[in-house]
Amino acid sequence: MKIGLVGLGRMGGNIARRLMQAGHQVVAWDRSEEAVQTLAKDGAEAATGLEDMATKLADKAIWWVMLPAGGPTEDTIAEIAKLAKDGDVVIDGGNSFYKDDIRRAKSLAEQGIHYVDVGTSGGVWGLERGYCMMIGGDKETVDHLDPIFDALAPGLGDIVRTPGRIAEKVDQRAEKGYIHAGPAGAGHFVKMIHNGIEYGLMQAYAEGFDILKSKNSDKLPEDERFDLNLTDIAEVWRRGSVISSWLLDLTAIALAKDEMLEQFSGHVADSGEGQWTIDAAMEEKVPANVLTASLFARYRSRVDHTYGDKVLSAMRFGFGGHTEIPQ
């Protein structure tokens, strides 16, 4: 299939590369000419802008937007809507707010344009590991795009299959690393909750390592102080422990490089999904104690930093290449 990919940042460029590795054609454009030319050397067809991209795409064109949520995505999709034709598909693979997806899908449908939202997880590791995708849109369009999603997904891999899954009652694609979650907006809603859970998991690790580090504090009686090796603790927890995970793997990598995490200030950013998750919990009247506390902990980190906040920043850098907010 031929895909027009707009936005060649940390994830967009590697999504294009993984698609090309699977035999798909990519027409690429980004405001950064350097990013476009770099991808062109890897096999993409370079476009000079959205209008040029429109001339290079086939009928029933597929436009994939991979940009930051908010203005950049909103403005780009509005420009694409002026160029797209009846039967074209617009995919938003970023982290847009799901209610914006619902609105866009209705608006584009009036022009005969299909809209698909793809909550995409995988960060800077996606080219190698594949991308976990949560997809929203009408069934016919999502099914048509399946070769694209299948190419981007991790596949079955060596993960043990879950006992008790009944083939007739489940989406078989879930085992490959992607699902059709529901109509427009459903994909980004599921990804939003995924990121909210991520906040809580990361905060738990961060607080735990902060407590371990502080066990050598001079505020404690001398015979109760332990000078613990956090690098070794992270490593041993990776092997057979009930709390092993990819986030712990990334923490272990960061601690192995520098146990004091001196490259991080502990000024932890958030990209919006945590707050949206709490907003959804409030709308649904669902208690979300852990997720709410983890979001507020990030706000607090911008005023007062702890070692745990450095652990959070290290994990964010590890999975997504996220840098801290300049102070």
Image (tube, helix red, strand yellow):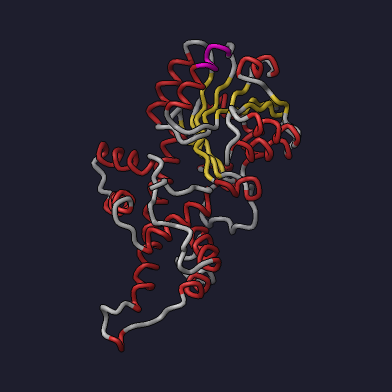
Identified at 53% across, 20% down, the residue is 114
Q: Residue furthest bottom?
A: 223
User: Against 252, is 134 above or below?
Assistant: above
Q: Position of residue 12 (x, y in %)?
A: 59, 36
Q: Position of residue 206 (x, y in %)?
A: 39, 62
Q: Is residue 82 magenta?
A: yes
Identified at 65% across, 45% down, the residue is 127
Q: Position of residue 198 (x, y in %)?
A: 42, 51
Q: Is residue 35 magenta?
A: no
Q: Nearer the viewer, residue 271 or 35?
A: 35
Helix, strand or loop: magenta stretch: helix
Q: How many marks?
A: 0
Q: For residue 253, which quarter of the picture?
A: bottom right
Q: Position of residue 117 (x, y in %)?
A: 50, 30
Q: Residue furthest front?
A: 327
User: Against 104, is 250 above or below?
Assistant: below
Q: For residue 227, which quarter of the picture?
A: bottom left
Identified at 53% across, 71% down, the residue is 235
Identified at 57% across, 41% down, the residue is 10
Left or right of residue 303, residue 99 in this image: right
Q: Nearer the viewer, residue 321 or 303?
A: 303
Please state the extent of the stretch shown in magenta in the rendering: 79-83
Q: Quadrant of the N terminus?
A: top right
Q: Nearer the viewer, residue 155 or 262?
A: 262
